[in-house]
Image: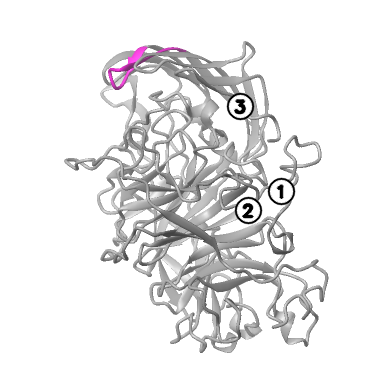
Amino acid sequence: MALLQVPSSAGERVPPPPAPERIKVEQLPLPPTAPSEDEGACSRAVNPRGTGCIVAHWDATQLGAHTRDGRHVTVSMEFAGAPAAPDPASIYQGRQIVLIKTDGRTFPGGDSWKCMTCGIPVENRQGISSNQAEPEPFPDGRRIRFGSTVLDCGRYPVTSSRCTPQRTHLYPIRWNTAADGSGDGGSMREVRLHPDGVHIGFSSVSGTGGRFGQYGYLGRLEFNPQPATGTPRVPRYDVTRVTRLFDRAPDKQPVHVDPKHPDRLVFDPRAQSVGELRGFSKDGREVFYVGYSHESAHIDLFAADLRTGKVRRVTAHPEYTDPMDSSPDDKWVVALDTRGSDRQMFLAAMRGVPPVTDLLTTSAVSSVRNNQQRRFFQPYLIDRYGDRGDYAGQQLNAGDGSPGSVSDPNWNAIANPQWSPDGTRVAYAQRLVSAPSCGGINPLPCPESTEPGGRHTRIMIAHLTDREPTRTRHVVPAPKRIHWGEEHVPGTPAPHRPYPPEGTYTMRGVKSGKATVEIVRDGPEPRTVAVSYRNFSDDGKTFLNGKESVTRTNLSLTKHRLDWHSDLVQTGAVQAEKKTSPDGFHLTIDLFQTYFEATGTLTTTVNGRTYTQPANGT
């Protein structure tokens, strides 16, 4: 199936797709697996050096990023089975931050890993949270940011043997959200260091007024040795000069009423729509994010220039894209994507449908990507110009799919992939599908792990063997002010995203035809969106006719029900249909639990190939 081309910058020539590369994938060594999580289970018989064992279960590890020297990666790792104190090995317990060698060498003690947070004195780790997500080294090589905490080795690199627990301090990161500076600050998720090492980007979920919302933010990290307000009242990093990456003006939204023609609805692909923040370009100029769909039911990556606000679409495949990392020269990305699994195709395979019902469906559609403890991500190498023609990137771990192999479809990638500083390698993590997403009443049997101790996680390195080392681009510091965003004012709630008023509108195709759009609101947001297409075409090659409507019921802040009716037909260059069963398609899903549960059917057929929805619970 041919893909729509990702628009390039003005005047930029889009080259032919790149040829496939030779890629060799290997696995990084991890600590032994604990026979159980009982105290003392990690005995000297299991680990003779007494440097810990990790749990076997699904979320034992999470990959961070490469260190500045390119010879280590940071990993968040859960240890278990340690003996009781005062045994020296008692420190290897619980969730910890670990360095793992990527070059086959070992640390002075003989292990290929080194626990960075194990054994840090209590007085050196005051006020920190339990969040240890996405550990990433600072550009200075002496600090690591994980969750909302900064690990600091003082004047020593984190990779040095002189970076000992006694010399290491953990400092909390606090984002002030109270007008008087009180409280413990706001919650931050998907935190990412800006390449300048001074700013951070993050997302925050808002539930004000019973409405779910998520915004991206950019702020400056400033060390505060003696805070006078807020908690924790310990030396910490404060996030200051915070900008919400959002413009609340109604005509700045992707779908809005035409200011000159109040009976018309328009879609503006140039609008910034930062939802979940995913990182930055290596030169620091762009912020990557999951944004509002450019085609109906698509979940794609976008980049916005921090200074100009110019938006660039990074991916355009109908499947779901989310975790990603840009190469050191910003000429490539590695994205974790469900492409190849057909997971989202029953929703998104019909191309060129304007994202109008997406006013209601985006959150639920994005949640179909997982089934609880089963992922469908695989790592894909995509050049800067993105999906185009028949080019949909190159899977890093392609193979025969045999059990336990690097291409075993039951081993799926988890956030986030990470390039090495020289651009010749990509690290990524995998998890093996686990109960209840397999076994029991689930029609998918649980596969048996072939990893040591039956471990359900592993860390992989893909070597791009045809590539020569490259240099990271010159880093441009984040701007002091982002004109297309708005200042975060502590004490004020996050805004509600504006929606078009209730009414009936016309949306015109770029080349021909039109759509009649009816919006029914339930208070401040739409409840029902119904669209009727007549010879609608943006490219002048494929023409859309038919009707589609969606009604959303919010069962809780994060659990939605969609009542979906579709009878769409495309003709011309593409022959396609998107149809629901006579009584409609009814999907209930929680945005974080991601358990698929539906009645009725939604089926999409494109040029003779049919895509059907997954069975409940799979």
Density class for disc 3 (Cα within 10 Å; few <14, some 14-19, many ≥20) is some
Where's residue 47, x and y in %? 72, 77
Please give the residue where the numbered disc 1 appears in the rendered image.
434
Task: Please indicate whether residue 46 sits to the left or right of residue 498 in the image.
Answer: right
Near-viewer residue (276 or 87): 87
Task: Residue type at mark 3: give it.
Answer: Gln
In this view, the residue farthest toward the left is 11
Residues drawn in magenta: 535-546
User: In the structure shown, which secondary structural element does the residue marked by tag 1 occupy?
Assistant: loop
The mark lying in front, picked from 2 and 3, is 2
Q: Quadrant of residue 285?
A: bottom left
Residue 181 visible somewhere in the drawing: no
Near-viewer residue (223 or 460): 460
- Specify which label sits upstream in the sequence, 3 or 1: 1
How many numbered discs, if any? Answer: 3
Density class for disc 1 (Cα within 10 Å; few <14, some 14-19, many ≥20) is many
Q: Quadrant of residue 555?
A: top right
Please give the residue where the numbered disc 2 appears in the rendered image.
431
> By what rule are the colours in the image chosen?
one colour
Where's residue 256, x and y in %? 36, 29
Please give the residue where the numbered disc 3 appears in the rendered image.
613
Contact between marks 3 and 1 (CB within 8 A): the answer is: no
Task: Please indicate whether residue 529 sits to the left or right of residue 17 in the image.
Answer: right
In the image, what residue occupies the spot 59% across and 45% down? 401
Tell me the CA gap for discs 2 and 1. Answer: 9 Å
In the image, what residue occupies the spot 62% across and 10% down? 582
- Specify which label sits upstream in the sequence, 2 or 3: 2
Quarter holding the C terminus?
top right
As displayed, is residue 484 above or below residue 351? below
Contact between marks 2 and 1 (CB within 8 A): the answer is: yes
